Image (cartoon, rainbow, N blue to C red):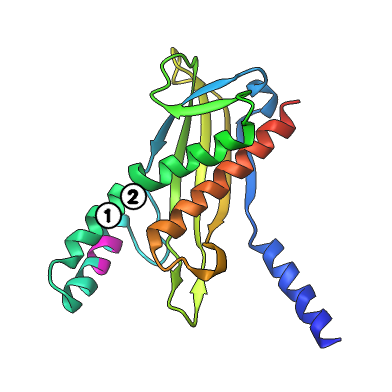
Amino acid sequence: MKKLLFLALLFSTSLLFSQKSKVQEGDWKNLKGITEYNLVFDYANLEIPKYDSEEDFLKDKMAKRDEKEPGTGEKFKESWFADRENRYEPKFIESFNKRFDDGEIKVDKDLGDAEYTMKVHTTLIYAGYNVGVSRRPSKIDAVISVYKNDNPDTVIFSVKYTNAEGSGAMGYDFDSGYRISESYAKLAKTFAKDLSKKTK
């Protein structure tokens, strides 16, 4: 009986914190028939939980690392920004496109033939942690907007996703950049699923 109660609580908790979406502008049907999107990523005004700003977050993390080993703070800052182009964005692209392995819909950066742009604006990043005995997945919030290339001021569709969680299989996700990249994979997977289902 206790085991059943525990499982029920665990299930309800996972539902409470699971990824959610809310349409901001337009309708899913506005995306029907679009087969290619030029991708752009935006990290402006990024929120980091428990910090006043991304700058404060970086100062704190750099100071703690430099205290343990001088010079490692700057390396952390470099990787924090480099991971966007090197890990998060490729992961989003890969995860989205493999949901349409028939090539029915495609996204990529610098996709010259695409008539529409899809902007992924990350509004929150929580890196999570894994210290062996305790771990918590990363999560991101993001607004995905679509507009025609020749009319960027007119958004035809926009949806906000919250709590896109990311973690590695079997608990081997000690690197924060890896965990966060898995959040982008989750975001892309959910968006692709919604796109496929709700535009029909």
Percent x, y of residue 111: 43, 21
Crowd rating for badge 2 (residues with CA inside 10 Å; few <14, some 14–19, many 20+): some
Residue 159 in view in this figure: yes
User: Where residue 79 is drawn, which disc sits there?
Assistant: 1
Residue 44 in view in this figure: no
Tell me if 46 is positioned left or right of 3 in this view.
left
> Residue at the bottom extreme?
2
Residue sitting at 63 percent across and 45 percent down? 21
Percent x, y of residue 188: 56, 42
Residue sitting at 69 percent across and 69 percent down? 13
Residue 59 lies within the magenta run:
yes
Q: Main secondary structure of the magenta part?
A: helix
What is the span of residues highlighted in magenta in the rendered image? 57-61
Q: CA distance from mark 2 to mark 1?
A: 6 Å
Placement of 17 over or under 194, stated as above or below? below
Percent x, y of residue 70: 12, 72
Tell me if 83 is positioned left or right of 131 in this view.
left
Residue 85 lies within the magenta run:
no
Quadrant where the image shows the N terminus: bottom right
Choose top left, top right, bottom left or bottom right for residue 9. bottom right
Tell me if 154 is positioned left or right of 15 in this view.
left
Residue that badge 2 annotates: 83
Residue sitting at 52 percent across and 65 percent down? 137
Query: Which of the pair 169/128 is nearer the observer?
Result: 169
